[in-house]
Amino acid sequence: MRSSTDNVFKALADPTRRAIFERLTRDGDQTVHALTEHAGVSQPMVSKHLSALKRAKLVRNRRQGRETHYSAQPQALAPLVDWIGHYGAFWQNKFARLEDLLERMDK
Amino acid sequence: MRSSTDNVFKALADPTRRAIFERLTRDGDQTVHALTEHAGVSQPMVSKHLSALKRAKLVRNRRQGRETHYSAQPQALAPLVDWIGHYGAFWQNKFARLEDLLERMDK
DNA sequence: ACAAACCATAACCGAATGGTTATGGTTTCT
DNA sequence: AGAAACCATAACCATTCGGTTATGGTTTGT
C-alpha cells in the first residue's frame, strides 16, 4: 500500500494527467467525453488517467445517466503541500513552514 | 524538452529519490557512500537517482578527491509551489498571492 | 425495439523505469 | 608502487506505464 503522498506525486507526475486535473480545476465539472476532446489521447486512456487521479483522490466522479462527470478535489493536494512544508527548507527562517502559512491564511 | 515543472514532479515521484532528497535537506551535505548506506538500494542505483535529481536541479554535486558530495537545492521546488499556486484552488484567493510571496521571500 | 452515445475494461504493445552485477577511472592510504 | 576506497557508467533484466484498438454494458434517442 502506497502512502497518500506517494499516490499524489505519482498521479501528478504525468503531464497528460496533470493537464486533466488542471482543466477540471479551471473549468469545473466535466464528462469523460468532454475531457477526451481536449486530452489528445483516446477515450480509454482518459478513463485510465481518471482512475489514477481517483486513486489519489484528486478527482471524484458522479454518474448521471450514461455519462460520468468528474470534478477536481484540490484538497487532495494537501499531502503535497504538507511535504513541501516539511522538506522545502526553501523558506526556512523566513516562514517557519508552509503549514503555519496555511493556518494563517485560512484565517 | 520537458518543462521544469515536469522534471520536478517526475523526479519526486519515486519514493527512494524523495527519501534521498529528504535526507539531504534534513541532514545536509552527503557523500554518495553515506547516502547509499541508508538508501536501501545499491550504490549505482543511488548514483542514478542522484542524476535524476540533478537533472531537475534538486541537488548539486561537488567533487572532493575521490568522493562526491551532494547537497539539496530546495529552491528547485519553486515550480512545484508555483503549480500549486495556480491549480490548488484549495485556498483560492487566499493563496493567490503565493507567487508574490515567493518573490518577496527571495528578497 | 433498435441504434447510437457514453464509458469502462480487456488485451495487447513498445518504451521507460527501477533494480541488479560487472567494470573501469580517480584518488587515497600504506 | 600496489591495494583499497569511492563513484559513475555499461550491460542487462523484469516490471510498470502510457498508449492503442476491440469489446461489452448502460442509458438515451427515434
Image (tube, coloured by chain):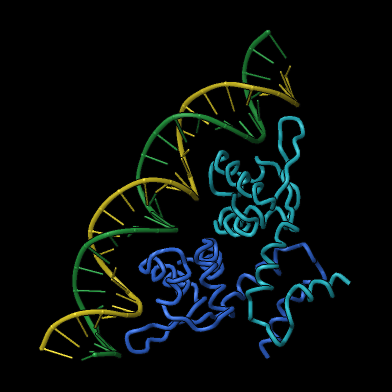
Chain colours: A cyan, B blue, C green, D yellow
Q: Name the residue nearer the viewer: B88 or B44.
A: B44
Between B20 and B77, the one nearer to me in the picture:
B20
Could you say which quadrant of the image residue B23 lies in?
bottom right
The part of the image, by quadrant, that contains residue A30 is: top right
- Which residue appears at 78% of the width and 71% of the height? B95
**Where does the image place residue A107, in percent across and percent down from the top left?**
89, 72
Q: Is residue A24 above or below residue B91?
A: above
From the top left corner, tell me how far across and down residue A46 is, in percent.
59, 44
Image location of residue A27, percent across then percent down: 74, 54
Name the foreground residue: A12 vs C20: C20
Residue at 63% x, 76% y is: A88
The percent coordinates of residue C30 (x first, y second) are 24, 90
Q: Left or right: A83 with respect to B65?
A: right
Which residue appears at 43% of the width and 80% of the height? B31
Residue depicted at x 56% and y 77%: B76
Q: How many marks?
A: 0
Is A83 placed left or right of D1 in the picture? right
Q: Pick the residue in front: B7 or C18.
A: C18
Q: Is residue C17 above or below residue A102?
A: above
**Residue B84 higher or lower than A91, as above or below:** above
Q: Is residue C2 above or below residue B88?
A: above
Left or right: B95 as drawn, with respect to D16: right
